[in-house]
Amino acid sequence: MNKQICLLCAALWSMAALSAQTGPWTKLFDGKTLKGWNQKDGQAKYTVENGQIVGTTVANTTNSFLCTNETYSDFILELELKVEDKMNSGIQFRSLSKPDYKEGRVHGYQMEIDPTARAWSGGIYDEARRDWLYIPNINPAGKKAFRIGEWNKYRIEAIGTTIRTWVNGVPVAHLTDDMTAKGFIALQVHAIYADMKEGMKIRWKNIKIQTKNLKSSALDDIPVINLLQNDLSAQEKAQGFSLLFNGRDFTGWRGVHADKMPDRHWSVMDGTINVKPSDGSETGNDIVTLEQYGAFELVFEFKLTEGANSGVKYFVNEDFDSGGKSGIGLEYQILDDERHPDAKMGAAGNRTLASLYDLIPSYKLEKRFQRPIGTWNQGRLVVYPNNIVQHWLNGFKAIEYERKSNIFDALVARSKYEKYQGFAAGDKGNLLLQDHGNEVSFRNLKIRTLK
Protein backbone atom coordinates (compact mmCIF):
# COMPACT_ATOMS: atom_id res chain seq x y z
CA MET A 1 0.00 0.00 0.00
CA ASN A 2 2.80 2.42 0.90
CA LYS A 3 4.42 1.77 -2.49
CA GLN A 4 1.14 2.55 -4.27
CA ILE A 5 0.74 5.76 -2.31
CA CYS A 6 4.29 6.79 -3.21
CA LEU A 7 3.67 6.10 -6.88
CA LEU A 8 0.42 8.07 -6.77
CA CYS A 9 2.14 11.01 -5.07
CA ALA A 10 4.94 10.92 -7.63
CA ALA A 11 2.42 10.96 -10.49
CA LEU A 12 0.51 13.86 -8.96
CA TRP A 13 3.74 15.76 -8.40
CA SER A 14 4.79 15.19 -12.04
CA MET A 15 1.42 16.42 -13.31
CA ALA A 16 1.64 19.50 -11.11
CA ALA A 17 5.20 20.18 -12.25
CA LEU A 18 4.20 19.86 -15.92
CA SER A 19 1.26 22.22 -15.38
CA ALA A 20 3.57 24.72 -13.70
CA GLN A 21 6.02 24.51 -16.59
CA THR A 22 3.56 24.97 -19.41
CA GLY A 23 0.91 27.17 -17.85
CA PRO A 24 -2.88 26.72 -17.99
CA TRP A 25 -4.96 26.48 -21.13
CA THR A 26 -7.54 29.20 -21.75
CA LYS A 27 -10.58 28.49 -23.92
CA LEU A 28 -11.08 30.97 -26.76
CA PHE A 29 -14.51 29.57 -27.65
CA ASP A 30 -17.16 28.81 -25.04
CA GLY A 31 -18.92 26.28 -27.29
CA LYS A 32 -22.17 28.25 -27.33
CA THR A 33 -21.62 31.83 -28.57
CA LEU A 34 -19.17 33.97 -30.51
CA LYS A 35 -18.40 36.03 -27.41
CA GLY A 36 -14.85 37.37 -27.58
CA TRP A 37 -14.81 37.35 -31.39
CA ASN A 38 -15.59 39.92 -34.12
CA GLN A 39 -15.81 39.65 -37.90
CA LYS A 40 -13.64 41.65 -40.29
CA ASP A 41 -13.43 42.09 -44.08
CA GLY A 42 -15.72 39.70 -45.99
CA GLN A 43 -19.33 38.65 -45.38
CA ALA A 44 -19.01 34.87 -44.98
CA LYS A 45 -21.38 33.41 -42.40
CA TYR A 46 -20.11 32.38 -38.96
CA THR A 47 -22.51 30.43 -36.72
CA VAL A 48 -22.35 28.14 -33.69
CA GLU A 49 -23.65 24.58 -34.09
CA ASN A 50 -23.22 21.64 -31.72
CA GLY A 51 -20.28 23.18 -29.89
CA GLN A 52 -18.55 24.16 -33.13
CA ILE A 53 -17.89 27.42 -34.94
CA VAL A 54 -19.07 26.93 -38.52
CA GLY A 55 -17.83 29.13 -41.35
CA THR A 56 -19.83 29.11 -44.60
CA THR A 57 -18.78 30.54 -47.95
CA VAL A 58 -20.85 33.32 -49.50
CA ALA A 59 -20.71 34.49 -53.11
CA ASN A 60 -19.38 37.89 -54.17
CA THR A 61 -17.36 38.70 -51.07
CA THR A 62 -13.70 38.92 -50.12
CA ASN A 63 -11.82 36.77 -47.61
CA SER A 64 -13.61 36.79 -44.26
CA PHE A 65 -12.07 36.61 -40.79
CA LEU A 66 -13.60 35.87 -37.40
CA CYS A 67 -11.09 37.57 -35.10
CA THR A 68 -10.40 37.45 -31.39
CA ASN A 69 -10.99 40.71 -29.53
CA GLU A 70 -7.75 40.10 -27.67
CA THR A 71 -4.27 40.24 -29.17
CA TYR A 72 -1.48 37.79 -28.41
CA SER A 73 2.30 37.86 -28.70
CA ASP A 74 3.91 34.63 -27.46
CA PHE A 75 1.49 31.70 -27.25
CA ILE A 76 0.72 28.07 -27.97
CA LEU A 77 -2.60 27.55 -29.76
CA GLU A 78 -4.43 24.29 -30.33
CA LEU A 79 -7.74 23.62 -32.06
CA GLU A 80 -9.53 21.02 -34.14
CA LEU A 81 -11.03 21.61 -37.57
CA LYS A 82 -12.82 19.81 -40.37
CA VAL A 83 -13.21 21.27 -43.84
CA GLU A 84 -14.91 20.26 -47.05
CA ASP A 85 -12.79 19.03 -49.94
CA LYS A 86 -11.22 21.81 -52.04
CA MET A 87 -12.25 24.59 -49.64
CA ASN A 88 -9.33 26.88 -48.82
CA SER A 89 -9.06 28.35 -45.33
CA GLY A 90 -6.54 29.22 -42.64
CA ILE A 91 -5.80 30.23 -39.06
CA GLN A 92 -4.54 33.79 -38.73
CA PHE A 93 -2.23 34.71 -35.84
CA ARG A 94 -0.22 37.74 -34.83
CA SER A 95 -2.46 39.45 -37.38
CA LEU A 96 -3.46 43.09 -37.72
CA SER A 97 -6.12 45.37 -39.14
CA LYS A 98 -5.08 49.02 -39.41
CA PRO A 99 -6.82 51.91 -41.18
CA ASP A 100 -3.53 52.98 -42.78
CA TYR A 101 -2.86 49.52 -44.29
CA LYS A 102 -5.04 48.64 -47.28
CA GLU A 103 -8.06 50.30 -45.65
CA GLY A 104 -8.07 47.97 -42.67
CA ARG A 105 -7.42 44.75 -44.59
CA VAL A 106 -6.57 41.85 -42.29
CA HIS A 107 -2.92 40.92 -42.73
CA GLY A 108 -0.37 38.74 -40.98
CA TYR A 109 0.71 35.16 -40.43
CA GLN A 110 -1.59 32.31 -41.41
CA MET A 111 -1.38 28.56 -40.85
CA GLU A 112 -2.79 27.13 -44.07
CA ILE A 113 -5.77 24.78 -44.42
CA ASP A 114 -5.52 23.17 -47.86
CA PRO A 115 -7.58 20.01 -48.53
CA THR A 116 -6.47 19.76 -52.17
CA ALA A 117 -3.89 17.73 -54.06
CA ARG A 118 -1.40 20.56 -53.47
CA ALA A 119 -1.33 19.50 -49.79
CA TRP A 120 0.08 22.67 -48.24
CA SER A 121 -1.89 22.36 -44.98
CA GLY A 122 0.21 23.56 -42.07
CA GLY A 123 2.33 25.82 -44.23
CA ILE A 124 2.75 29.47 -43.28
CA TYR A 125 1.32 32.19 -45.50
CA ASP A 126 1.58 35.96 -44.96
CA GLU A 127 -1.95 37.16 -45.69
CA ALA A 128 -2.19 40.40 -47.73
CA ARG A 129 1.50 41.10 -47.25
CA ARG A 130 4.43 38.88 -48.34
CA ASP A 131 2.59 35.81 -49.67
CA TRP A 132 4.09 32.36 -48.88
CA LEU A 133 6.77 32.16 -46.20
CA TYR A 134 6.97 28.39 -45.65
CA ILE A 135 5.81 26.06 -48.42
CA PRO A 136 5.68 22.44 -47.17
CA ASN A 137 7.19 21.06 -50.38
CA ILE A 138 10.51 20.98 -48.50
CA ASN A 139 8.93 18.75 -45.81
CA PRO A 140 7.27 15.78 -47.57
CA ALA A 141 6.26 14.05 -44.32
CA GLY A 142 4.43 17.19 -43.21
CA LYS A 143 2.43 17.28 -46.45
CA LYS A 144 0.93 13.87 -45.59
CA ALA A 145 -0.34 14.83 -42.13
CA PHE A 146 -3.67 16.44 -43.06
CA ARG A 147 -6.72 14.15 -43.30
CA ILE A 148 -9.32 15.29 -45.82
CA GLY A 149 -12.91 15.04 -44.61
CA GLU A 150 -11.88 14.27 -41.01
CA TRP A 151 -11.15 16.26 -37.87
CA ASN A 152 -7.58 17.56 -37.80
CA LYS A 153 -5.70 18.85 -34.77
CA TYR A 154 -3.75 22.06 -35.43
CA ARG A 155 -1.02 23.42 -33.16
CA ILE A 156 0.87 26.71 -33.45
CA GLU A 157 3.81 27.71 -31.28
CA ALA A 158 4.74 31.38 -31.63
CA ILE A 159 7.52 32.11 -29.14
CA GLY A 160 9.79 35.05 -29.82
CA THR A 161 10.88 34.96 -33.45
CA THR A 162 10.27 31.21 -33.74
CA ILE A 163 6.99 30.07 -35.32
CA ARG A 164 6.25 26.34 -35.62
CA THR A 165 3.19 24.39 -36.77
CA TRP A 166 1.91 20.83 -36.38
CA VAL A 167 -0.96 18.96 -38.04
CA ASN A 168 -2.15 15.88 -36.16
CA GLY A 169 1.08 15.82 -34.18
CA VAL A 170 3.32 15.96 -37.27
CA PRO A 171 5.66 18.99 -37.55
CA VAL A 172 4.94 20.84 -40.80
CA ALA A 173 6.58 24.29 -40.72
CA HIS A 174 9.40 25.98 -38.82
CA LEU A 175 9.81 29.70 -39.50
CA THR A 176 12.07 32.31 -37.93
CA ASP A 177 10.80 35.84 -38.54
CA ASP A 178 10.43 39.14 -36.70
CA MET A 179 8.03 41.20 -38.81
CA THR A 180 5.08 41.10 -36.40
CA ALA A 181 5.38 40.36 -32.66
CA LYS A 182 1.75 40.66 -31.60
CA GLY A 183 -1.75 40.52 -33.07
CA PHE A 184 -5.12 38.83 -33.03
CA ILE A 185 -6.04 35.26 -33.95
CA ALA A 186 -8.65 34.74 -36.67
CA LEU A 187 -10.54 31.96 -38.43
CA GLN A 188 -10.59 32.50 -42.18
CA VAL A 189 -13.27 31.64 -44.72
CA HIS A 190 -11.64 32.22 -48.09
CA ALA A 191 -13.41 34.01 -50.91
CA ILE A 192 -14.80 31.64 -53.53
CA TYR A 193 -12.32 30.76 -56.29
CA ALA A 194 -11.22 27.78 -58.41
CA ASP A 195 -13.28 24.69 -57.40
CA MET A 196 -14.90 26.38 -54.40
CA LYS A 197 -18.61 27.18 -54.39
CA GLU A 198 -21.20 28.90 -52.24
CA GLY A 199 -22.33 27.07 -49.12
CA MET A 200 -19.11 25.19 -48.41
CA LYS A 201 -18.38 24.80 -44.69
CA ILE A 202 -15.46 24.60 -42.33
CA ARG A 203 -15.86 23.67 -38.65
CA TRP A 204 -13.66 24.54 -35.65
CA LYS A 205 -13.85 23.28 -32.07
CA ASN A 206 -11.82 22.92 -28.87
CA ILE A 207 -10.00 26.22 -29.44
CA LYS A 208 -7.58 26.88 -26.58
CA ILE A 209 -4.44 28.91 -25.93
CA GLN A 210 -1.50 29.13 -23.53
CA THR A 211 0.24 32.46 -22.91
CA LYS A 212 2.22 31.90 -19.70
CA ASN A 213 5.21 29.73 -18.75
CA LEU A 214 5.49 28.54 -22.34
CA LYS A 215 7.65 25.57 -23.09
CA SER A 216 8.72 24.98 -26.69
CA SER A 217 8.39 21.52 -28.17
CA ALA A 218 11.59 19.56 -28.65
CA LEU A 219 13.63 20.35 -31.74
CA ASP A 220 13.12 18.12 -34.78
CA ASP A 221 14.75 17.70 -38.18
CA ILE A 222 12.37 19.48 -40.56
CA PRO A 223 13.84 22.29 -42.68
CA VAL A 224 13.88 25.81 -41.24
CA ILE A 225 13.05 28.95 -43.18
CA ASN A 226 14.94 31.70 -41.37
CA LEU A 227 14.14 35.23 -42.55
CA LEU A 228 16.44 36.94 -40.06
CA GLN A 229 19.55 38.23 -41.75
CA ASN A 230 22.67 36.05 -41.44
CA ASP A 231 21.22 34.27 -38.41
CA LEU A 232 21.21 30.66 -37.26
CA SER A 233 18.23 29.43 -35.28
CA ALA A 234 18.56 26.81 -32.55
CA GLN A 235 17.17 24.13 -34.88
CA GLU A 236 19.54 25.07 -37.71
CA LYS A 237 22.48 24.81 -35.34
CA ALA A 238 21.25 21.42 -34.11
CA GLN A 239 20.99 20.27 -37.73
CA GLY A 240 24.64 21.17 -38.31
CA PHE A 241 24.30 24.38 -40.30
CA SER A 242 26.95 27.08 -40.10
CA LEU A 243 27.17 30.51 -41.71
CA LEU A 244 29.15 30.56 -44.95
CA PHE A 245 29.10 34.38 -44.80
CA ASN A 246 29.36 36.13 -41.44
CA GLY A 247 27.58 39.30 -42.58
CA ARG A 248 30.62 41.52 -41.95
CA ASP A 249 33.53 40.55 -44.21
CA PHE A 250 34.90 37.88 -46.56
CA THR A 251 36.35 35.58 -43.93
CA GLY A 252 36.40 32.09 -45.47
CA TRP A 253 36.54 33.36 -49.05
CA ARG A 254 39.22 34.21 -51.64
CA GLY A 255 39.47 34.93 -55.33
CA VAL A 256 39.38 31.97 -57.69
CA HIS A 257 42.94 31.02 -58.72
CA ALA A 258 44.20 33.39 -56.01
CA ASP A 259 45.13 33.42 -52.33
CA LYS A 260 43.23 36.59 -51.45
CA MET A 261 40.04 38.43 -52.34
CA PRO A 262 39.86 40.36 -55.65
CA ASP A 263 40.57 44.08 -55.26
CA ARG A 264 37.56 45.08 -57.37
CA HIS A 265 33.81 44.64 -57.65
CA TRP A 266 33.16 42.80 -54.34
CA SER A 267 31.98 44.52 -51.15
CA VAL A 268 30.01 43.87 -47.97
CA MET A 269 27.33 46.38 -47.04
CA ASP A 270 24.41 46.13 -44.60
CA GLY A 271 24.96 42.41 -44.12
CA THR A 272 24.96 41.55 -47.83
CA ILE A 273 27.60 40.54 -50.36
CA ASN A 274 27.45 42.89 -53.32
CA VAL A 275 28.94 42.55 -56.79
CA LYS A 276 29.38 45.93 -58.44
CA PRO A 277 28.52 46.24 -62.16
CA SER A 278 31.12 46.74 -64.86
CA ASP A 279 30.61 47.30 -68.56
CA GLY A 280 29.87 43.60 -68.86
CA SER A 281 33.15 42.73 -70.51
CA GLU A 282 35.23 42.40 -67.35
CA THR A 283 34.43 39.05 -65.76
CA GLY A 284 36.35 36.35 -63.95
CA ASN A 285 36.63 38.07 -60.58
CA ASP A 286 34.82 35.14 -59.00
CA ILE A 287 35.26 34.23 -55.35
CA VAL A 288 35.46 30.73 -53.87
CA THR A 289 35.25 29.20 -50.42
CA LEU A 290 38.46 28.26 -48.67
CA GLU A 291 36.91 24.90 -47.82
CA GLN A 292 35.83 22.21 -50.24
CA TYR A 293 32.56 20.32 -50.00
CA GLY A 294 31.25 16.94 -51.14
CA ALA A 295 27.80 16.02 -49.87
CA PHE A 296 26.18 19.16 -48.50
CA GLU A 297 23.10 21.37 -48.25
CA LEU A 298 23.51 25.05 -49.09
CA VAL A 299 20.81 27.69 -48.61
CA PHE A 300 21.26 31.23 -49.85
CA GLU A 301 19.36 34.33 -50.91
CA PHE A 302 20.10 36.40 -53.98
CA LYS A 303 18.83 39.62 -55.51
CA LEU A 304 19.19 40.55 -59.17
CA THR A 305 19.13 43.89 -60.91
CA GLU A 306 17.52 44.20 -64.33
CA GLY A 307 19.29 42.15 -66.99
CA ALA A 308 21.76 40.63 -64.50
CA ASN A 309 23.60 37.33 -64.81
CA SER A 310 25.41 35.42 -62.06
CA GLY A 311 25.60 31.97 -60.55
CA VAL A 312 26.50 29.77 -57.61
CA LYS A 313 28.95 27.07 -58.65
CA TYR A 314 29.87 23.85 -56.87
CA PHE A 315 32.48 21.14 -57.35
CA VAL A 316 34.71 23.87 -58.76
CA ASN A 317 38.07 22.51 -59.92
CA GLU A 318 40.79 25.15 -60.11
CA ASP A 319 43.06 22.78 -62.02
CA PHE A 320 40.95 23.53 -65.09
CA ASP A 321 42.14 26.46 -67.18
CA SER A 322 39.24 28.86 -67.66
CA GLY A 323 41.22 31.27 -69.82
CA GLY A 324 40.89 34.04 -67.25
CA LYS A 325 37.13 33.72 -67.10
CA SER A 326 34.81 32.16 -64.51
CA GLY A 327 35.98 29.20 -62.47
CA ILE A 328 34.90 25.82 -63.86
CA GLY A 329 32.25 23.82 -62.04
CA LEU A 330 28.57 22.93 -61.91
CA GLU A 331 26.41 26.05 -61.81
CA TYR A 332 23.09 26.96 -60.23
CA GLN A 333 22.16 29.63 -62.77
CA ILE A 334 21.09 33.05 -61.50
CA LEU A 335 19.61 35.14 -64.30
CA ASP A 336 17.03 37.71 -65.29
CA ASP A 337 15.32 35.41 -67.80
CA GLU A 338 13.23 38.17 -69.32
CA ARG A 339 16.05 40.56 -70.14
CA HIS A 340 19.32 38.65 -70.43
CA PRO A 341 20.06 36.99 -73.82
CA ASP A 342 21.63 33.92 -72.18
CA ALA A 343 18.13 32.69 -71.32
CA LYS A 344 17.51 31.98 -75.01
CA MET A 345 20.87 30.31 -75.62
CA GLY A 346 21.98 26.78 -74.80
CA ALA A 347 19.35 24.07 -75.33
CA ALA A 348 15.73 23.78 -74.13
CA GLY A 349 16.14 26.57 -71.60
CA ASN A 350 19.12 25.07 -69.79
CA ARG A 351 20.60 28.50 -69.13
CA THR A 352 17.58 29.97 -67.35
CA LEU A 353 17.11 30.72 -63.64
CA ALA A 354 17.77 27.77 -61.27
CA SER A 355 18.88 25.52 -64.14
CA LEU A 356 22.03 23.44 -64.06
CA TYR A 357 23.78 25.81 -66.44
CA ASP A 358 24.18 24.48 -70.00
CA LEU A 359 23.13 20.99 -68.90
CA ILE A 360 19.59 20.66 -67.45
CA PRO A 361 16.73 23.20 -67.63
CA SER A 362 14.76 24.03 -64.50
CA TYR A 363 11.03 23.60 -64.04
CA LYS A 364 9.47 27.04 -64.34
CA LEU A 365 7.49 28.41 -61.41
CA GLU A 366 4.04 29.93 -61.63
CA LYS A 367 4.27 33.69 -62.07
CA ARG A 368 3.21 34.42 -58.49
CA PHE A 369 6.24 32.51 -57.16
CA GLN A 370 8.73 34.16 -59.53
CA ARG A 371 9.75 37.02 -57.28
CA PRO A 372 10.27 40.29 -59.14
CA ILE A 373 13.71 41.56 -60.10
CA GLY A 374 15.03 43.67 -57.25
CA THR A 375 13.55 41.45 -54.51
CA TRP A 376 15.14 38.58 -52.62
CA ASN A 377 14.83 34.98 -53.83
CA GLN A 378 15.79 31.90 -51.86
CA GLY A 379 17.93 29.21 -53.43
CA ARG A 380 18.64 25.80 -51.97
CA LEU A 381 21.22 23.38 -53.31
CA VAL A 382 21.41 19.82 -52.00
CA VAL A 383 24.06 17.25 -52.93
CA TYR A 384 23.32 13.90 -51.28
CA PRO A 385 26.01 11.31 -50.50
CA ASN A 386 24.62 9.11 -53.32
CA ASN A 387 25.26 11.97 -55.82
CA ILE A 388 21.59 12.89 -56.23
CA VAL A 389 21.55 16.69 -56.63
CA GLN A 390 18.61 19.08 -56.27
CA HIS A 391 18.17 22.76 -57.11
CA TRP A 392 15.36 24.55 -55.22
CA LEU A 393 13.94 28.01 -55.82
CA ASN A 394 11.54 29.80 -53.45
CA GLY A 395 10.32 26.53 -51.94
CA PHE A 396 9.96 24.59 -55.21
CA LYS A 397 12.26 21.86 -56.49
CA ALA A 398 13.53 23.13 -59.85
CA ILE A 399 15.66 20.17 -60.96
CA GLU A 400 16.95 16.81 -59.73
CA TYR A 401 19.68 14.73 -61.33
CA GLU A 402 22.37 12.16 -60.54
CA ARG A 403 25.95 13.37 -60.76
CA LYS A 404 28.45 10.91 -62.28
CA SER A 405 25.65 8.86 -63.90
CA ASN A 406 25.68 7.78 -67.55
CA ILE A 407 22.99 10.31 -68.40
CA PHE A 408 24.93 13.08 -66.66
CA ASP A 409 28.12 12.14 -68.53
CA ALA A 410 26.21 12.21 -71.83
CA LEU A 411 24.90 15.72 -71.07
CA VAL A 412 28.41 16.93 -70.26
CA ALA A 413 29.72 15.45 -73.55
CA ARG A 414 27.23 17.64 -75.45
CA SER A 415 27.89 20.83 -73.51
CA LYS A 416 30.51 23.59 -73.30
CA TYR A 417 32.24 21.49 -70.62
CA GLU A 418 33.09 18.53 -72.86
CA LYS A 419 36.73 19.63 -73.17
CA TYR A 420 37.32 19.37 -69.41
CA GLN A 421 38.30 15.78 -68.67
CA GLY A 422 36.68 14.67 -65.41
CA PHE A 423 34.38 17.70 -65.19
CA ALA A 424 32.42 17.75 -61.88
CA ALA A 425 33.58 14.21 -61.08
CA GLY A 426 35.57 15.05 -57.95
CA ASP A 427 34.48 13.91 -54.52
CA LYS A 428 34.84 17.49 -53.27
CA GLY A 429 35.16 20.98 -54.70
CA ASN A 430 34.97 24.66 -53.84
CA LEU A 431 31.79 26.71 -53.88
CA LEU A 432 31.87 29.84 -56.03
CA LEU A 433 29.97 33.11 -56.36
CA GLN A 434 30.20 34.48 -59.87
CA ASP A 435 31.08 37.97 -61.05
CA HIS A 436 29.55 38.22 -64.51
CA GLY A 437 29.89 41.99 -64.77
CA ASN A 438 26.39 42.69 -63.42
CA GLU A 439 25.10 43.97 -60.09
CA VAL A 440 23.94 41.10 -57.85
CA SER A 441 23.61 40.68 -54.08
CA PHE A 442 23.81 37.63 -51.79
CA ARG A 443 22.99 37.05 -48.12
CA ASN A 444 22.02 34.32 -45.64
CA LEU A 445 24.50 31.78 -46.99
CA LYS A 446 24.37 28.68 -44.77
CA ILE A 447 25.80 25.22 -45.23
CA ARG A 448 25.89 21.82 -43.60
CA THR A 449 27.60 18.60 -44.59
CA LEU A 450 25.48 15.51 -45.24
CA LYS A 451 26.40 11.97 -44.31
Image (tube, grey):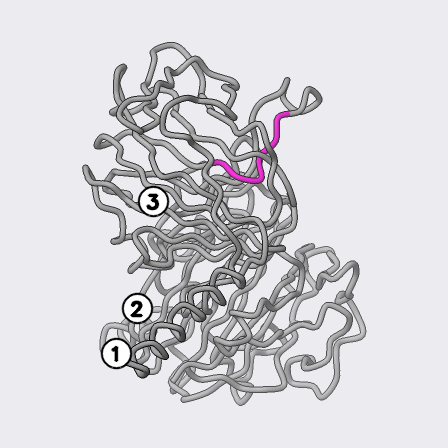
Furthest toward the front, the residue is: 1
Q: Position of residue 434 (x, y in %)?
A: 61, 67
Residue 391 against residue 59 in the figure, above or below: below
Q: Which residue is mark 3?
A: 121
Give neighbour class at mark 1: few <14, some 14-19, many 20+ (Cα, 10 Å): few
**Quick one: 140 or 96, which is closer to the camera?**
96
Q: CA distance from mark 2 to mark 3?
A: 28 Å
| Amino acid identity at mark 3 | Ser
Q: Which residue is mark 2?
A: 401
Q: Position of residue 425 (x, y in %)?
A: 38, 85
SS at badge 2 = strand
> Earlier along the polypeptide chain: callout 3 or callout 1?
3
Q: CA distance from mark 1 to mark 2?
A: 9 Å
Of the two numbered discs 2 and 3 in the rendering, the one whose residue sits closer to the viewer: 3
Tell me the tag on residue 283. Answer: none
Q: Which residue is mark 1?
A: 405
Report the residue at 37% width, 42% height from top: 79
Q: Position of residue 207 (x, y in %)?
A: 40, 38
Residue 120 against residue 282 in the figure, above or below: above
Report the residue at 38% width, 25% height from top: 189
| Amino acid identity at mark 1 | Ser
Q: Are marks 3 and 1 in contact (CB under 8 Å)?
A: no
Give neighbour class at mark 2: few <14, some 14-19, many 20+ (Cα, 10 Å): some
Q: CA distance from mark 3 to mark 1?
A: 36 Å
| Amino acid identity at mark 2 | Tyr
Report the residue at 29% width, 60% height from top: 141
Tell me where residue 372 sits by quadrant.
top right
* Stretch of the chain drawn in magenta: 92-97
* Number of marks present in the image shown: 3
SS at badge 1 = loop
